[in-house]
Image (cartoon, grey):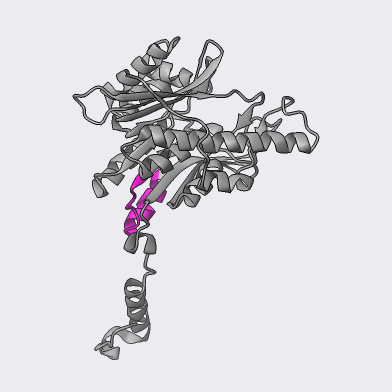
């Protein structure tokens, strides 16, 4: 409610009084942000990723699962496309670094910039990635305990699909400020300049990344001798060796889009619930993802489509129970 005003009308004039009252109403009746006043037990995530109108990649693949797991999520769409780029054509727009910063300044001007987590995925230019680094600094100046979960999306199966100059920025500037890193095998090799051929190589790549910055590293997929593995590593103290584990993942004979984005979101969600048990968080994340992929595959077959004829859009909404309460079918095996 507006307090009583002791203002002389002649002093302000009719329009001056109206403007003054309006400013007071705005300042005193700004809508309370309940996610700040009454934060959830999980937290608030700022998610800077791509967005497609149709389909589930980037933020479309990450926001919903995080919300199911109890987070308030504020998405910033680094691109807005009609569909993902695997289709014959796509239309849309790309956000630049200045436009990203404009959004951050708007949030800050209204005291809305408190976050417990920052999540980033695909970033297509050096200028935008540098702007993201500025965002990390800004968020940590407001909340020094901010957890930054970075999926360094650069390429897969030996091929880069971002400009090559991004690799050095990730390696030299982004990795040192990340709390958790979730590269695939190829991306881990790019970041460490170290070839991964064996499980021991995967563990050593994690060690190299720990030495640079992040306390948690999950190499989400490693192909070794025709086997698909996840290797996780948690360095709880800087001067101590990390706790490391692997999860054997069954190969599904199909290609899906948005799975890396979903996996990182699930790892963020479950590792927040189990901060000292990255292996348990990874078990839950892998089990959720595998159940979702199997449902997607079965549904395509049921609809009469050949799952190997093209990439498959994941059945995210239909799998929400598997996200909320996954049955752990894939167990972590600790390295000693």
Q: Is residue 108 magenta?
A: yes
Q: Identify which residue, 265 or 82, lies in the foreground.
A: 265
Q: Quadrant of the C terminus?
A: top left
In the image, taking residue 159 as reference, residue 175 lies left or right, namely left
Q: Which residue is drawn at the image coordinates 40% and 16% (left, top)?
A: 202
Horizontal and vertical percent position of residue 102: 40, 48
Residue 45: where, in percent of width, then height?
40, 48
Span of residues in magenta: 101-117
Residue 99 shows up from this direction: no
| Residue that appears at 55% across and 36% down | 289
Does the rendering let one see residue 211? Answer: yes
Left or right: where 175 falls relative to 308? left
Query: In this figure, what is the number of numbered marks?
Result: 0
Quadrant of the frame with the N terminus: bottom left
Q: Is residue 259 left or right of residue 41?
A: right
Q: Position of residue 156 (x, y in %)?
A: 53, 20
Question: Which residue is outermost to the left?
Answer: 239
Magenta span includes 335: no
């Amino acid at each position: 409610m507006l307090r009583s005003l002791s203002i002389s009308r002649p002093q302000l004039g009719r329009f001056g009084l109206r403007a003054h009252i309006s400013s007071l109403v705005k300042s005193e009746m700004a809508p309370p942000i309940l996610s700040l006043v009454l934060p959830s037990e999980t937290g608030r995530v700022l998610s800077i990723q791509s967005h497609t109108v149709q389909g589930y990649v980037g933020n479309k693949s990450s926001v919903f699962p995080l919300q199911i797991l109890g987070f308030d999520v504020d998405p910033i769409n680094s691109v807005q496309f009609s569909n993902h780029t695997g289709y014959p054509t796509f239309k849309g727009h790309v956000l630049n670094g200045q436009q990203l910063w404009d959004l951050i300044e708007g949030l800050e001007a209204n005291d809305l910039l408190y976050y417990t987590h920052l999540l980033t995925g695909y970033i297509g230019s050096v200028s935008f990635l540098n702007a993201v680094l500025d965002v990390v600094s800004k968020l940590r100046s407001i909340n020094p305990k901010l957890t930054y979960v970075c999926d360094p999306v650069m390429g897969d199966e030996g091929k880069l699909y971002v400009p090559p100059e991004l690799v050095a920025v990730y390696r030299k500037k982004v990795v040192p400020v990340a709390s958790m890193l979730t590269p695939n095998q190829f991306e881990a090799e790019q970041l460490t300049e170290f070839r991964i051929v064996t499980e021991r190589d995967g563990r050593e790549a994690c060690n190299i990344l720990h030495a640079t910055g992040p306390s948690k590293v999950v190499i989400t997929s490693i192909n070794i001798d025709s086997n698909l593995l996840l290797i996780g590593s948690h360095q709880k103290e800087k001067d101590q060796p990390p706790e490391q584990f692997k999860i054997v993942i069954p190969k599904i004979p199909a290609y899906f889009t948005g799975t890396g984005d979903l996996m990182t979101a699930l790892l963020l969600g479950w590792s927040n619930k189990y901060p000292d048990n990255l292996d348990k968080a990874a078990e839950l994340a892998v089990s959720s993802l595998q159940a979702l992929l199997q449902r997607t595959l079965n549904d395509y077959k049921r609809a009469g489509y050949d799952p190997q004829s093209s990439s498959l859009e994941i059945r995210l909404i239909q799998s929400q129970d598997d996200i909320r309460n996954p049955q752990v079918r894939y167990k972590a095996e600790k390295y000693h």
